[in-house]
Image: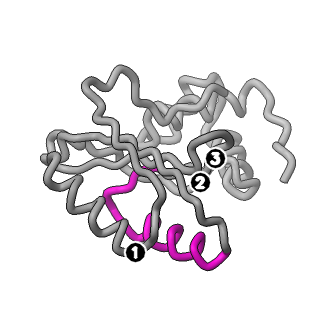
Amino acid sequence: MPAPDLDPLDRKILAELQNDASQSLDDIARKVGSSKTPVWNRIRKLREAGVIGRQTVLLDAESLGLEACFFVLIRTAEHEPDWQDRFLHSVRSRPEVLEAHRLAGDIDYILKVRVENARAYDRFYQALIRDVRIHNVTALLSMEEIKNTTILPV
């Protein structure tokens, strides 16, 4: 699907929504230099075009006791559709997995996993390898989160 043409006002609106989607339409309109109705119409069109997806709330993982963030590098020797279906189902069904990417290169997949501690990671790992056969797994513990954002450069 081709990206829609975004003019400077669309980009300002998107930047405001990414910064704080709970703002009122009046606040957004004031900040972007427009009025409420045109801002609402643009937001509606951006939703319809798929530029704006679902709205959600960002939670602080450490405040919820999820203090350990692991990046899990997975290499597999199996690339059959049945294996991939089971792997994808396993990964998508686990709430600990915040992100999962299929990669080009030596590593087949990378997962971002958020859990309470190393024991919780081990429970996740044991469940994953019960679901699917994996050739090699490397877990990297994040010692410090330097940057974490959901804001895209618009």
Q: Residues within 10 Å of mark 3 (few under 14, many from 20)?
A: some
Could you tell which of marks 3 and 2 lies nearer the N-terminus?
3
Q: Position of residue 48 (x, y in %)?
A: 72, 58
Question: Residue at left 46%, top 41%?
Answer: 21
**Circle 2 residue:** 53
Q: Position of residue 29 (x, y in %)?
A: 58, 32
Q: Amino acid at mark 2?
A: Gly
Q: Comparing marks 3 and 1, which lies closer to the viewer?
A: 1
Name the side, left or right, on which 63 lies relative to 154: left
In the rendered view, would you say 119 is above or below 27? below
Quadrant in the picture for residue 130: bottom left
Q: Nearer the viewer, residue 52 or 137?
A: 137
Disc 1 to disc 2: CB gap under 8 Å: no
Q: Position of residue 104 (x, y in %)?
A: 68, 42
Please report the bounds of the magenta region as a residue range.
81-99
Quadrant in the picture for residue 4: top right
Q: CA distance from mark 3 to mark 1?
A: 46 Å
Quadrant of the drawing holding the C terminus: top right
**Circle 1 residue:** 131
Question: Residue at left 71%, top 48%?
Answer: 46
Question: Residue at left 36%, top 67%?
Answer: 129
Name the side, left or right, on which 28 lies relative to 115: right
**Circle 3 residue:** 40
Could you tell which of marks 3 and 1 lies nearer the N-terminus?
3
Q: Amino acid at mark 3?
A: Trp
Q: CA distance from mark 1 to mark 2?
A: 31 Å
Q: Position of residue 87 (x, y in %)?
A: 51, 69
